[in-house]
Image (spheres, rainbow, N blue to C red):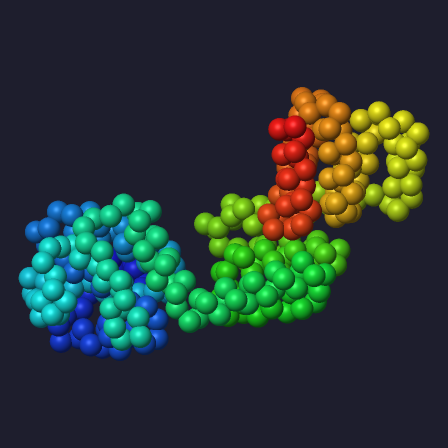
Amino acid sequence: MADAAALHTKDTTDQEFMTDVVEASNTQPVIVDFWAPWCGPCRQLGPVIEKVVESHKGAVKLVKINIDENPAYAGQLGVRSIPAVYAFDKGRPVDAFMGALPEGQVRGFIDKLVTGTDSAQEIADALAQAEAASQAGDVATAAQIYAAVVQHDPENVAAIAGLARCYLANGDKERASATLDMVPEDQKHDSAIKGVRMAIDMMEDAPAADEFDELLNAVMAAPDDHAKRFELAEKYAAAQRYGDAVDHLLIILGSKMDWEEGKAKEKLLQIFEAAGPTDPVTVEGRQRLASLMFA
């Protein structure tokens, strides 16, 4: 029996199967759970599959059918044991599994189905285009694409994080912070969101332009003064000059990997998080760090 509070889960019958499953799957994927009240594994799987479907917030629907009362379509599909779960898309069954799988496998099954839909693929393509534009320095185009994705899918964490990064690239941390407020509560600890928050936190200590010259001169005059070099790296990071910050931190680590009990390495990893995993600064920086660690 579907939970009355479940927005995207319903019970159906053989008489309504064509409407609730076959026709409905032309609009969005539909998961069909064939079950029976006497089936222990069915009672085990039911809450799990409902939870995963509801977590996709309408990207997929779940239809439950009691085969004791509605045996026709279960028979047509060749169901021999339950629970039996079928995925329908565009009016036909496209995938299935039998038995009470653990939540991780159920989520993988549904994620695969949702990712394979036309709408999901369009969003994935748009996010890839936005990422490419951002990496190429075309922040305006990236922002437009991310904003379009957010308009279509207001809870898309990757698009929200990307749009916030675009605001940061233009120095607008207030709008970046406001954009992050759109993130659903259960997604606030997503790595992409945490990275943007790290970047915003670093900007709190953004220096004046003349501070760079003063610190850089001090470092050039005393290249072994790691404390001064670290301070300079922090200022570069606060100004989102991540490449410059990484260069100076790697000089410290090249001289002494555990300087100040790992302080430089910790800051370096924070910068990687702030820049994002696909940023060239992060990719190249991780390679250079690995070279130092395993030289």
Q: Which quadrant of the rendered structure holds the N terminus?
A: bottom left
Compared across the picture, whether 70 is left or right of 243 comes to left
Question: Looking at the image, is 253 positioned above or below residue 153?
Answer: above
Q: Is residue 172 above or below residue 254?
A: below
Q: How many marks?
A: 0
The image quarter containing residue 220 is: top right
Residue shown at 17%/57% (left/top)? 84
Q: Note whether 267 is above or below 241 in the view shown.
A: above
Residue 88 appears at what percent x and percent y? 27, 68
Residue at image location 62% in from the left, 43% down from the top: 273
Within the image, what quadrant is residue 21 found in? bottom left
Q: Position of residue 179 (x, y in %)?
A: 61, 58
Q: Is residue 204 visible?
A: no
Rendered-image quadrant of the C terminus: top right
Q: Residue 221 location in percent, x, y?
A: 93, 29
Is residue 231 found left or right of 98 in the rendered image?
right
Note whether 282 is above or below 118 in the view shown.
Answer: above
Residue 100 visible, this orientation? yes
x%, y% of residue 29? 32, 68
Given residues 142 and 67, the one toward you in this image is 142
Left or right of 180, for residue 118? left
- Most foreground residue, 21 or 216: 216
Residue 178 in which image quadrant: bottom right
Q: Residue at x 74, y 59 (%)?
A: 170
